[in-house]
Amino acid sequence: MSITDFVTDLLNPDLAFLPKALAIAVMSSIVCGVVGCYVVLRGMAFIGDAVAHAVFPGLAVAFVLQGSLVLGGAVAGVATALLIAIFSQNRRVKEDSVIGVFLVAAFALGIVIISQAPGYSGSLQQFLFGSITGIPDRDLYLVGVSGLVILSLVFALHKEFVAVCLDREMARSMGLPVFWLDIVLYVLVTLAVVISLQTIGNILVLALLITPAAAARLLTDRLGVMMLLAPAIGGTSALVGLYLSWSYDTPVGGTIVLVATAVFLAAWLLAPRHGLLVRRWRRPARHEPSADTRPNDETGVAAARGATAAVS
Amino acid sequence: MRALDIEDLDVDLGGRPVLRDVRLRLDRGELVGLLGPNGAGKTTLLRAILALIRTRGGRVLVEGKPSRPGRSAIGYVPQRHEFTWDFPISVEQTVLSGRTGRIGLLRRPGVADWRAVGDALDRVQLSELRGRPVAELSGGQRQRVLVARALALAPSILLLDEPFTGLDMPTQELLSDLFASLAQEGRAVLMTTHDLVAAMESCTRLVLLNGQVIADGRPEDLQDAEVWMRTFGVRETSPLLKLVKVA
């Protein structure tokens, strides 16, 4: 299918679900891209996975009660994020074990609940793998508004999140409320996951959080640039993925994730400073000195004491 | 007024006594080495000074007031491995992050903040590397970035946790000189270290700690081999005593 056909379909009133799905997919990918930067830099991918699974019982309850899936998922996800944050304060059990416990427990609860609902198997597939049809209008607004709220909170608390990422002990000594900042970050991750569930699905949503941010990290050493690149990569992957999915009749969540993965692989190969190809290309030309021996590194103090440094 | 005044400090961790009856006073201009074996409570003492842990008894006064995180004028330089060095952030931004608490929630850094960052970078002579990602720095440069981050608060007390660990001799000497001049400029500097020789050389005073303060004096006054043996739990034949020139 050509791009013109895709645009025609987008504008076709009989296919009204298509632009809605596109809007939700792109919006949620952008939000996930931004929030995913913290997830990647703090190495909390496992927490992302946990809350992604944890929203499942909420979806199940919402499905059984015919309520809003986004709302149900958000409540369950936030509850789990809080439980993880609180239980992690006890140093006897490591955080990853706590996450493991709640991740599986929540998913198990979801399965039990949804098995009680008649005709669950079809809907189950929709939860797990995402779908572009049957998105109610109110979810469109819900996703838009919560996306804006998430991004504003990230913008407002950015320097605090960075300080905690860099060095928790130092952050505490500066009087920052580290525990509360952790909780806010967990909740933001949860909300980003929840608004992405509709189109991407429960199983694959982690990719939207991790893959664009990881690809952006490969492309830059500047946090500001990374936090612009990640949502750009995410949003583009959503757009291209949805187009391919519509053209070739493939599952939308899987297709979007595969596009994002392709971007990640391309970044890994082609990144301007640290990419595999650049390193291959450079190696015969010049030997890259390590950071410790780079000659112009110890400027200033070392220059004043050049003689001493030269002895080493 | 004393920069730091610790009186009868008792600290328990996990129900076990770690520090008992610790008395320690620091004036501006002093570079004090805090020496003791692993598990002596050195880092615990630093955390108690920062008011990051609950104390059982005694008190910690900074400039005459009880220590409080974010309120007291303490610059903290943690061990290098505490910092996330692969984070995509420049030297300058890292130093600015030291003022996060002071800038306050929902506020952006202003002129005063950037001036403090510039001064701190000048002081540790890293201004030329201000735009470089921290991941690309050498060990000595990393240590200086952490010192600059602490200095960005213009503290009257500087706490350094094991600043020499994993650094080569020339880099250690550069840092020793830096710490000595930071003290001479009117700060009270307290530094934990396992490098006894460097401490004997550069510190104006040494505090030997093992659960309690065992000795406290100028390096040249700590000539009694017995206090070293008691602090580190070594025999009189230990090469440690030769290292500190009491045997």
Image (spheres, helix red, strand yellow):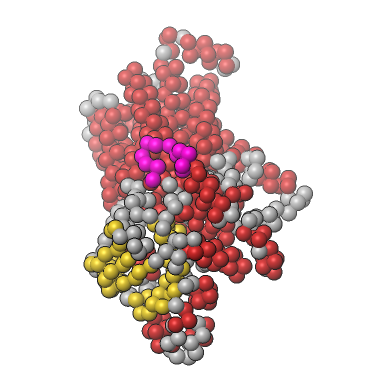
Compare residues B128 and A73 and report the one nearer the observer: B128
Q: Which quadrant of the figure has residue B40?
A: bottom left
* Residue A209 visible in the shown view: no
Image quadrant holding the N terminus of chain A, namely top right
- Please state if A288 lies on the left or on the right of A14 as rendered: right
Image quadrant holding the C terminus of chain A, namely bottom right
Residue B153 place in picture, x, y as percent: 43, 51
* Residue B57 visible in the shown view: yes
Does A113 appear in magenta? no
User: Is B145 drawn above or below residue A35 in the view shown?
Assistant: below
> What residue lies at 73% left-to-right and 47% top-to-bottom?
A282
Spot the residue most to the front.
B1
Compare residues B185 and B96 and report the one nearer the observer: B185
> What residue lies at 39% left-to-right and 45% top-to-bottom?
B102
Residue B99 place in picture, x, y as percent: 43, 47
Residue B77 place in picture, x, y as percent: 45, 59
User: Is B178 drawn above or below residue A230 in the view shown?
Assistant: below
Total marks shown come to 0
Instruction: Identify the magenta region.
Output: B102-113
Does B103 appear in magenta? yes
